[in-house]
Each structure stands twice: as structure tokens, then as C-alpha cells.
């Protein structure tokens, strides 16, 4: 391999990472006092935690070349389900467990439609997106559930954390939301990278026929994968409801596109263009850092949206162009 | 290789574009305005009123819209707290963003509500007086029907800002012994409120077929008033002199008032005035004044055929 070819290969895999580092250097130079500080990064980690949980578990189905459009409305639905139990004066744990169960059931429905009935993931999850969203509106009567109906134990979770010292005389917490996201990250990493289940999902993503002929139970594994994605979406919805101390039938809607974008950003870092949860973590971090840095630089919020979209397209374009060129 | 550096080139372009778009004012107070609702006309007027007043004071204002995402409001409050802005203005239910307000309080950064709702974590909230608005339209109805006759009310008690309006109208109608409340209706608002109010009003019209049996419709906001107007026109009873009033003076209501039909009055909130008064409250606080008023009310205006042209022109 020539030096140039080697450099090119390295750039191809690392283009997104290098771009990200440039963004960090740029923000550090322009926001010198606050950007590269521990409180700010803990802050970012907390802000992206809901997106992170959604994107990590979205990675599981995207490994097989599938995706799940219903995660956002599942997140809204799970928040509403939990809040209804809270309003009924049920213990927090009961509301949380039922909401997570709703995620599993929703994922089961997606999995059945995709793997047993054979509807394409786009159509199947577009349908369930509408069903979950409609259910969230039906159950809540279209209203936001907030105030006294949401127990302080539940909303306090998102505001709490583990004390890790002080910064400029302010107590510094390692946020609970960040801890949950990290736990989900480790679980998804182990499942995808260290188990036979994960290797089979990658095999399905590589060549579904070959996987089937090789004895992989494709249908069953896809079903399980969709259930895990549904469970993750429900968990993200609970984190969201805890953070805003309320539940609204549309509040998770923004998670779906950002989660898919984060996985795509992560895919640009892998040699084969496969999703890996480590890449997804980088994708989520890029989105969070851009939001945080551009806000602090007082860039207009609409300019910010255009920029983030352009960066996603730029990263994926550069990665696919360079892959095709070799 | 050439293609592989595409992304880097692209990023440099982004960075250059950013440099052009950011003007950092030195020393002037920096105030962040955070809202999920900038796409709504009322919120736009609020923000424009605030910006105009802030420009006169020479402040650097950072307007942040999270496009409906309430959790993102908390995130953006955390960001601007970290950045160390001088003050934060929110236009969102403070209860839902309490996590962000606590972060601001811990950092000693004052937060002001701009038509947001009262909250102990806010220095003050600048808004319109819901009680006063309801009193304006309820007394208009009493005066127009000579204090006697049947009145249909459209209320919405589950939502506190609208519940306030209903309770004042109840009191004013109860103070006129010759007024009978035919029905006190809570419409289903999931479709925006017009369609269901129309259906409910059609039922009331069917149950009260005698001309003159319904003297007025009092609605706690404009959508049910518009629905009632549609029902009355569809039933061909627009010439019985039924008086309809709403609150909020939304563009559709203004058109209906200007058309000169049964929809006679609504109340316009002075959103630009609320924005400007919020800026004044921030200025007073930054100058060291203690603000005792937890809520600052900005006067509203009764809109009728007499002055509707002023409001149509400004929309």
C-alpha cells in the first residue's frame, strides 16, 4: 500500500472524527471561558441522554439494515402511560415498569409486522408511529399531564446526580440521566459486539440470505431486535418526562430523526459502513456539542438547524464518496 | 484522497460562515430569550416587542427557539447559564422547565417570564390579566342585552388561564338576576376547538328554537365563539340579534368582527407591550432594583366594530 493510499484510507475512516475535533477547537477558541469545562460537558452529556438512549437502541435494528420510525411516538406514549399511573397515585416504580412494558409491546408489534408478516420497516414503523401517537393523544385526551400529577420522586431523578466535587464554588453533579445513558451504552455495546446474538445481527445486515442459509433464525432475531429498540424508546420517553416534569403526547417526536442522524454520522466512521454503537455515541455527541456551542455563540436557532442538517449530509457524503472512489 | 478531504473543506466553509454570522458585543448586557413557540404569531409579537426595547437599551439579545421541544428549552437555559448571560427570559410554562430554572437560580442568573405563568423561580412574569379580559367581554354582553335573557357560555376549566376567565363571567352574569345561563359548555379542544363548539352550539340552537330565546354567546376564547357563529349562520338564525363575544382577538375573530355579523367583540392582548415591559423589568432588575410584583399586568383592549380596523392593519 502506498503512503497516499494509506493516508486516504485513514482519512476516510476518520474524516468525521477530524471534523468533530475541528468543531471542538473552534468552539474552544470562540467560547474560551466556558466551552471546554467539566460542567459544560456534564451538561451536554445530560442534554443528549434521551437522544443517546434512543440512538443506541436504534443502532440494534440498523445493524440489520432496518430502522424504526416509531421511536419518537413510542417515547411520547411511554411518558403518557407513566404519567397516567402517577395521576392515579400509583407508585413511581409501577408507572415506570408499565411504560417500559408498553415499549416492549410496541417493539413486539413492529417486529411481528416486519419479520413475520414481511412488511418493509419503513411502512410498518410509519404505521405504528401513527398508532402510538394516536394512542398517546387518546390516553391523555390531548392534554399535557403536569404539576401535582407528576411525583417529585420522578421529576427529581432528572435533576439529581452523584456529587463529584465543586467547580467555581458550585456543586458539581454527575447527572443521573448521563448515568442511565452510559449504562444503556455498555449494554448495547456488549450485546452487539460481544455476543453471538450481535454477530448474527451483523450477519443479517451483511447478507440476509447467507445468514438464513447459515442457520441464523432471522425472523426471531429481528423480532427481538425491534423489541429492544422499542424498550429503549420507552426508556428515553421516561427520561424526557422526568426532565420536563410533565408528559405531553408529542414531546418525543423530535427524537426519531436525530437518532437516525446520529447512527448515520456514526456509520461514516466504520470501514464497512456498518453501524456500531461507539460510532453512534460519537454521532450523538456531535449533535449535542453543536447545539451547545452554537447556542453559546448566539447563532440564530434556525441557522443552527440548517447547519446541523448540512453537517450530517456533508459527513455522510464525504464518507460515501470516498468509499465509492476506492 | 481528493474526495476524502471534501468533508474538511466543507467544514472550513461552515466555520467561515459562522464567523460572519456572529457579532460579539463587548460589555453590553447579554440577555437570552428562550421559547419553544416562536412559530406562533403571539410569541413573535412578544419577542419583537422585547427586541425593540432591548435594542434601545443597547443589549445583546440571543433569541432561541426550540421548535416545540420543551426539554430543549431546559438544555438551552443550561447552555446560556454556563455561558454566563446577564438575564434569561422564557416564554413557556415555568413548571415544565423547572430543572433549567433551578440551574439558573444556583448560578445566580435572574429569569423573567414573558407571558409564561407565575413561579417562585421567576423574578416576575409579565402578562395580560385574564380576570380583566373576561370582565371586559362579560360586561359588554350584559350591556348589549340590557341585562336580561338567555346566555350560552363556552368555558374550559381544566386549563387554569382560561378557567380564570370563566369564573369572572359567572360572577358578572350572576349579578344580573334577569340573565339565565342556558348552558355552560366545555368544548372538546383536540381539533382546535371550532368544530366541536359548532356541534355543541347546533344542539343548543335545536333545543331553543324560539327566536330571542338565546340573547348572547360568551366564549372564554375565540375558537368556540367562531364555532358558535358558524352554527348560528348555518341554522339561518343570524338575524335574531344573538351577540357573540370571544377573547384573544385572533385574526379569524378580527375578520368576523370586521364583517359586522353576530361576532361583535373580543379582547386583544398587547403582546408587543408585554415584550417591551419584560425588557423594562429586566432593566430595573439589572439596575439593582428589587421587583416586588410577582406578576406585572399589561392592559388589554376591547375590540369591536368601532376599532377593529386598527387591529386588522397591525396584523
Image (cartoon, helix red, strand yellow):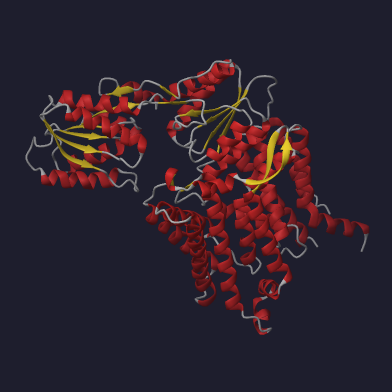
Does B191 sit above or below residue B221?
Answer: below
Residue at 22% from the left image edge and 29% from the top image edge: B171
The quarter of the picture where the C terminus of chain A appears is bottom right
Report the residue that reaches farthest toward the right. A2
Q: For this view, does B224 lie left or right of residue B71?
A: left
Q: Is residue B2 visible?
A: yes
**Residue visible at 61% across and 45% down in the picture:** A160
Taking depth in this image into account, of A84 and B313 the one nearest to the observer is: A84
Point out residue A296 in the picture as x, y percentages from the top left corner. 67, 34
**How far across and down, in percent of the image, does residue A100 sit?**
52, 62
Q: Toward the viewer: A191 or B174?
A: B174
Up-down relation of residue B133 to residue A231 (above or below):
above
In the picture, measured across the screen, residue A121 lies left or right of residue B299, that is right
Residue plotted at (65% across, 59% down): A184
Res. A275 in view:
no
| Residue B122 picture location, percent across and down | 51, 29
Q: Quadrant of residue B296?
A: top left
Tell which residue pokes out farthest to the left in this image. Answer: B210
Relative horizontal placement of residue A6, taking residue A255 as reference (left or right): right
Figure quadrant of residue A266: bottom right
Taking the spot 59% from the left edge, 52% from the top edge, the residue there is A50
Position of the N terminus of chain A by quadrant: bottom right
Within the image, what quadrant is residue B162 found in? Answer: top left
Amino acid at each position: 500500500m502506498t503512503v497516499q493510499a494509506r493516508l486516504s484510507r485513514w482519512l476516510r475512516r476518520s474524516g468525521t472524527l477530524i471534523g468533530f475535533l475541528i468543531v471542538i477547537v473552534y468552539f474552544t477558541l470562540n467560547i474560551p471561558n466556558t466551552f471546554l469545562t467539566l460542567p459544560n460537558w456534564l451538561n451536554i452529556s445530560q442534554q443528549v441522554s434521551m437522544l443517546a438512549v434512543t440512538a443506541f437502541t436504534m443502532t440494534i435494528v440498523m445493524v440489520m439494515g432496518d430502522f424504526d420510525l416509531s421511536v419518537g411516538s413510542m417515547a411520547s406514549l411511554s411518558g403518557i402511560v407513566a404519567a397516567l399511573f402517577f395521576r392515579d397515585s400509583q407508585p413511581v416504580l409501577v408507572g415506570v415498569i408499565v411504560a417500559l412494558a408498553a415499549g416492549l409491546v410496541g417493539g413486539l408489534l413492529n417486529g411481528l409486522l416486519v419479520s413475520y408478516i414481511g412488511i418493509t420497516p419503513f411502512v410498518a414503523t410509519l404505521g405504528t408511529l401513527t398508532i402510538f401517537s394516536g394512542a398517546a393523544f387518546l390516553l391523555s385526551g390531548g392534554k399535557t399531564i403536569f404539576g401535582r400529577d407528576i411525583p417529585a420522586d420522578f421529576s427529581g431523578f432528572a435533576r439529581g446526580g452523584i456529587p463529584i466535587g465543586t467547580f467555581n464554588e458550585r456543586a458539581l453533579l454527575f447527572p443521573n440521566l448521563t448515568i442511565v445513558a452510559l449504562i444503556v451504552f455498555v449494554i448495547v455495546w456488549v450485546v452487539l459486539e460481544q455476543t453471538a446474538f450481535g454477530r448474527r445481527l451483523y450477519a443479517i445486515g451483511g447478507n440476509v440470505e447467507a445468514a438464513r442459509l447459515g442457520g441464523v433464525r432471522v425472523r426471531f432475531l429481528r423480532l427481538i431486535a425491534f423489541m429492544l429498540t422499542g424498550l429503549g424508546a420507552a426508556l428515553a420517553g421516561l427520561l424526557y418526562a422526568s426532565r420536563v416534569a410533565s408528559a405531553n403526547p408529542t414531546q418525543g417526536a423530535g427524537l426519531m430523526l436525530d437518532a437516525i442522524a446520529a447512527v448515520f454520522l456514526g456509520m461514516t466512521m466504520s470501514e464497512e459502513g456498518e453501524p456500531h454503537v461507539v460510532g453512534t455515541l460519537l454521532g450523538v455527541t456531535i449533535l449535542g456539542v453543536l447545539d451547545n456551542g452554537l447556542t453559546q455563540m448566539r447563532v440564530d436557532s434556525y441557522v443552527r438547524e440548517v447547519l446541523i442538517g448540512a453537517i450530517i449530509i456533508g459527513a455522510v457524503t464525504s464518507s460515501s464518496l470516498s468509499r465509492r472512489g476506492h | 484522497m481528493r474526495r476524502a478531504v471534501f468533508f474538511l473543506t466543507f467544514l472550513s466553509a461552515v466555520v467561515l460562515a459562522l464567523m460572519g454570522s456572529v457579532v460579539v458585543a463587548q460589555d453590553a448586557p447579554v440577555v437570552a430569550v428562550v421559547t419553544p413557540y416562536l412559530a406562533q404569531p403571539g410569541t413573535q409579537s412578544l419577542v419583537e416587542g422585547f427586541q425593540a426595547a432591548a435594542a434601545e437599551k443597547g443589549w445583546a439579545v440571543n433569541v432561541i427557539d426550540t421548535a416545540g421541544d420543551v426539554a430543549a428549552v431546559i438544555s438551552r437555559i443550561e447552555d446560556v447559564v454556563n455561558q454566563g448571560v446577564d438575564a434569561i427570559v422564557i416564554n413557556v410554562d415555568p413548571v415544565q422547565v423547572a430543572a433549567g430554572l433551578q440551574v439558573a437560580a444556583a448560578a445566580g442568573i435572574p429569569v423573567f417570564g414573558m407571558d409564561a405563568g407565575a413561579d417562585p423561580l421567576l423574578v416576575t412574569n409579565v402578562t395580560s390579566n385574564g380576570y380583566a379580559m373576561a370582565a371586559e367581554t362579560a360586561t359588554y354582553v350584559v350591556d348589549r342585552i340590557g341585562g336580561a335573557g338567555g346566555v350560552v357560555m363556552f368555558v374550559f376549566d381544566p386549563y387554569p388561564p382560561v378557567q380564570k376567565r370563566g369564573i369572572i363571567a359567572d360572577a358578572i352574569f350572576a349579578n344580573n338576576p334577569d340573565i339565565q345561563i342556558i348552558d355552560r359548555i366545555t368544548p372538546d379542544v383536540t381539533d382546535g376547538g371550532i368544530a366541536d363548539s359548532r356541534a355543541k352550539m347546533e344542539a343548543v340552537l335545536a333545543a331553543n328554537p324560539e327566536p330571542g330565546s338565546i340573547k348572547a354567546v360568551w366564549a372564554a376564547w375565540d375558537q368556540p365563539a367562531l364555532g358558535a357563529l358558524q352554527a348560528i349562520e348555518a341554522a339561518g338564525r343570524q338575524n335574531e340579534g344573538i351577540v357573540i363575544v370571544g377573547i384573544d382577538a385572533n385574526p379569524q375573530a378580527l375578520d368576523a368582527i370586521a364583517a359586522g355579523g353576530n361576532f361583535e367583540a373580543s379582547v386583544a392582548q398587547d403582546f408587543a407591550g408585554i415584550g417591551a415591559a419584560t425588557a423594562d423589568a429586566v432593566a430595573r432588575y439589572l439596575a439593582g432594583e428589587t421587583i416586588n410584583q410577582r406578576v406585572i399586568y399589561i392592559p388589554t383592549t376591547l375590540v369591536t366594530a368601532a376599532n377593529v380596523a386598527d387591529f386588522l392593519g397591525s396584523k
